[in-house]
């Protein structure tokens, strides 16, 4: 396929993640240096494909110095006009936006499009590929919850930030004899909460995969108090929910915006304080996990992803997503990635390690 290839596009969709710029840099350098292709950057995600299109050519000089930078040089936007929303119980797609995007790729003369995005963004990419747009995807989510790949870039940076926050909270929790709760990202999967909780020495970890009983969490706090430990640290994924209960939203959303999770840690904090009498405080890390410079590991992973995506285009592996399996990049079909998210399985070794260390998940098995 590379014989007729001249011009490819690249965009980043959804939320930002540390390493996006490293991916874009690798795409530009590989396409330019190895294949002599022109790279067109699409600004503000898929929205940049809607008339009037927002694009710019990306040459080697345009990506100098971008390896350590956070954010996205092309901008990241919500899925906007491409979002699939329920309408009277039926899932609908904004067909006009998709038709315009297809027409734009043709009008821009793009021989292929590299899409950097998470679960929702790759679902849009898949739909566009079914309409004839030649696409290769690159997984982007700090939640590390895309199936088909062992790792997504940005996760390592988010994990470091969450772990450092827990480390810092230990000293103030111990000094003031408080219960401190850290709310981290993780809508469907608890990878950040689980790994940061173990790495940071948390006492209680609440994740979406294990519905929790707040009474069990309170019992853990009381147990520690009986042992002379007058403080406790809880790590709470934003998608954690009580057994038999519902997710907690800080914004229920509406016809023009998606619902936004948040507030579960505050609710648990109130209950812990009521059940134990121990003063509780909440820290919500939120977008701190997304921002700033990527770790060395995320820079390496992002660079591998960008290079592998361009090579996948050159080798004709269109309709695939670049993934990381074992210790090397591979490609997997879109269909394997968009059907579900990769959650923490019940028998995962880190769950066993956490319990061996005395950490409780306050679930039915704890």
Image (cartoon, helix red, strand yellow):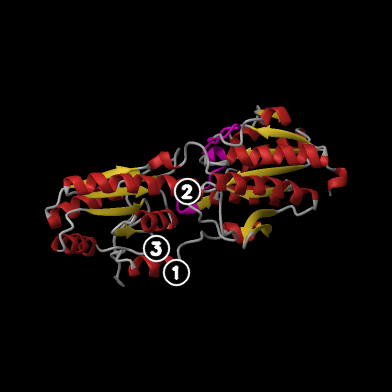
Q: Which one is closest to the eye, mark 2 or mark 1?
A: 1
Rounded to the nearest angstrom, the CA distance separating label 2 from label 1 is: 41 Å
Q: Which residue is located at x 71 percent, y 27 percent? A: 61
Given residues 323 and 176, the one toward you in this image is: 176
Q: Which residue is located at x 80 percent, y 37 percent? A: 37
Query: Sequence order check: which comes first, mark 3 or mark 1?
Result: 3
Residue at the disc numbered 3: 209
Given residues 293 and 366, the one toward you in this image is: 293
The reply to whether dot 3 and dot 1 touch (C-beta < 8 Å) is no
Asked if residue 358 lies left or right of residue 193, the reply is left
List the single residue furthest toward the right: 3
The reply to whether dot 2 and dot 1 touch (C-beta < 8 Å) is no
Q: Compared to 111, does 48 lie above or below?
A: above
**Residue 77 colored in magenta in the image:** yes
Given residues 288 and 343, the one toward you in this image is: 288
Label disc, if present, on residue 87 of the rendered structure:
2
Asked if residue 241 lies left or right of residue 71, the reply is left
Q: Which one is closest to the eye, mark 3 or mark 2?
A: 3
Quarter of the C terminus within the rendering: bottom left
Q: Position of residue 43 (x, y in %)?
A: 62, 32
Q: Which one is closest to the eye, mark 3 or mark 1?
A: 1
Label disc, if present, on residue 349 of the rendered structure:
1
Query: Sequence order check: which comes first, mark 2 or mark 1?
Result: 2
| Dominant SS in magenta | loop
| Quadrant position of residue 34 | top right
**Residue 18 colored in magenta in the image:** no
What kind of element bears circle 1? helix
Rounded to the nearest angstrom, the CA distance separating label 3 from label 2 is: 28 Å
Q: Magenta segment range?
A: 70-90
């Amino acid at each position: 396929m590379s014989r007729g290839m001249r011009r490819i596009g690249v965009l980043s969709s959804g939320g930002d993640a540390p390493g996006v710029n490293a991916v874009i840099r690798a795409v530009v350098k590989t396409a330019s240096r190895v294949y002599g292709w022109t790279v067109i950057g699409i600004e503000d995600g898929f929205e940049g494909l809607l008339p009037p299109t927002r694009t710019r050519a990306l040459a080697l000089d345009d990506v100098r110095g971008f390896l350590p930078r956070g954010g996205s040089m092309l901008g990241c936007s919500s899925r906007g006009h491409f979002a699939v929303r329920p309408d009277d119980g039926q899932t609908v797609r904004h067909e006009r936006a998709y038709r315009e995007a297809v027409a734009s790729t043709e009008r821009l003369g793009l021989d292929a499009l590299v899409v950097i995005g998470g679960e929702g963004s790759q679902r849009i990419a898949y739909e566009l590929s079914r309409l004839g747009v030649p696409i290769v995807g690159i997984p982007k989510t700090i939640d590390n919850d895309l199936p088909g790949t062992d790792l997504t870039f940005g996760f390592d940076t988010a994990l470091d930030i969450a772990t450092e926050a827990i480390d810092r909270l230990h000293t103030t929790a111990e000094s003031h004899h408080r219960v401190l709760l850290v709310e981290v990202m993780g809508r469907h999967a608890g990878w950040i909460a689980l790994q940061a909780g173990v790495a940071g020495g948390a006492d209680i970890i609440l994740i979406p995969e294990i519905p929790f009983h707040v009474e069990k969490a309170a019992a853990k706090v009381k147990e520690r108090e009986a042992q002379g430990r007058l403080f406790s640290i809880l790590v709470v994924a934003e998608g954690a929910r009580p057994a038999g209960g519902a997710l907690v939203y800080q914004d229920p959303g509406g016809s023009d915006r998606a619902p936004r999770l948040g507030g579960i840690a505050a609710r648990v904090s109130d209950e812990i304080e009521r059940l134990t009498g121990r003063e509780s405080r909440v820290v919500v890390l939120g977008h701190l996990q997304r921002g700033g410079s990527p770790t060395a590991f995320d820079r390496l992973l992002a660079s591998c992803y960008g290079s592998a995506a361009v090579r996948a285009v050159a080798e004709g592996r269109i309709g695939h997503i670049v993934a990381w399996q074992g210790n090397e990049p591979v490609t997997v079909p879109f269909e394997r990635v968009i059907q579900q998210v990769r959650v923490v399985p019940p028998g995962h070794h880190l769950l066993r390690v956490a319990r061996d260390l005395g950490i409780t998940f306050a679930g039915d098995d704890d």
